[in-house]
Image (spheres, rainbow, N blue to C red):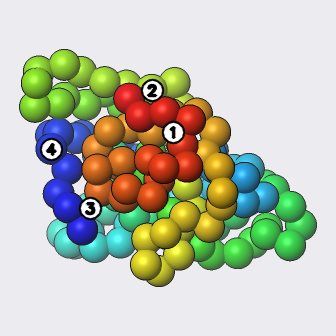
Amino acid sequence: MKAITASATKGLTLRSWCTCADNSGAKEVYIMGVMGSKGRRRMSPKAGIGDIVKVVIKKGKPEMRKKVEKAVVIRVKKEYRRATGERIKFEDNAVVLVDDKGLPKASEIKGVVAKEAAERFPKLAGISAGVV
């Protein structure tokens, strides 16, 4: 997996609610874990753009609800800085459900994907509406 080029602030904590921006059947998800995060005593793990998180599907199709899945963060409200000096922030926090290999479970992504997440997961860029 490729490292991201921005110095992204980790804007999502555990128990954050995000919208699911794909057509897999999930609408809203709840972050319950961050994959690959190193621990420090009494600090909860945080997630930023392009990170893989464990989520619980809270709203969506009845067969999808209450399931634990992996997802990639594609948009965050928290402003972060790119290497070029520009600052980027989005209107919502959004994730896309992926499998164990990092391939998307859906066939379409609603909205745009951040460039950092598209560099790390090229398949997400292929099925998205655009890359910002």
Q: Earlier in the sequence, mark 3 or mark 1?
A: 3
Q: Report which residue position mark 4 lands on.
A: 5
What residue sits 51% from the left and 39% below the top? 93
Say whether residue 13 is left or right of residue 60. left
Q: State the residue lying farthest toward the right.
A: 62
Q: Distance between the Cα atoms at labels 3 and 1? A: 21 Å
Q: Report which residue position mark 3 lands on.
A: 43
The answer to whether the residues at label 2 and label 1 have Cβ atoms under 8 Å apart is yes
Q: Nearer the viewer, mark 4 or mark 2?
A: 4
Residue 93 is labelled as 1
Residue 90 is labelled as 2
Q: State the residue lying farthest toward the front.
A: 126
Q: Distance between the Cα atoms at labels 2 and 3? A: 26 Å
Q: Earlier in the sequence, mark 4 or mark 1?
A: 4
What residue sits 17% from the left and 57% below the top? 3
Q: Is residue 45 visible?
A: yes
Helix, strand or loop under label 3: loop
Q: Earlier in the sequence, mark 4 or mark 3?
A: 4
Q: State the residue lying farthest toward the bottom.
A: 100
Helix, strand or loop under label 2: loop
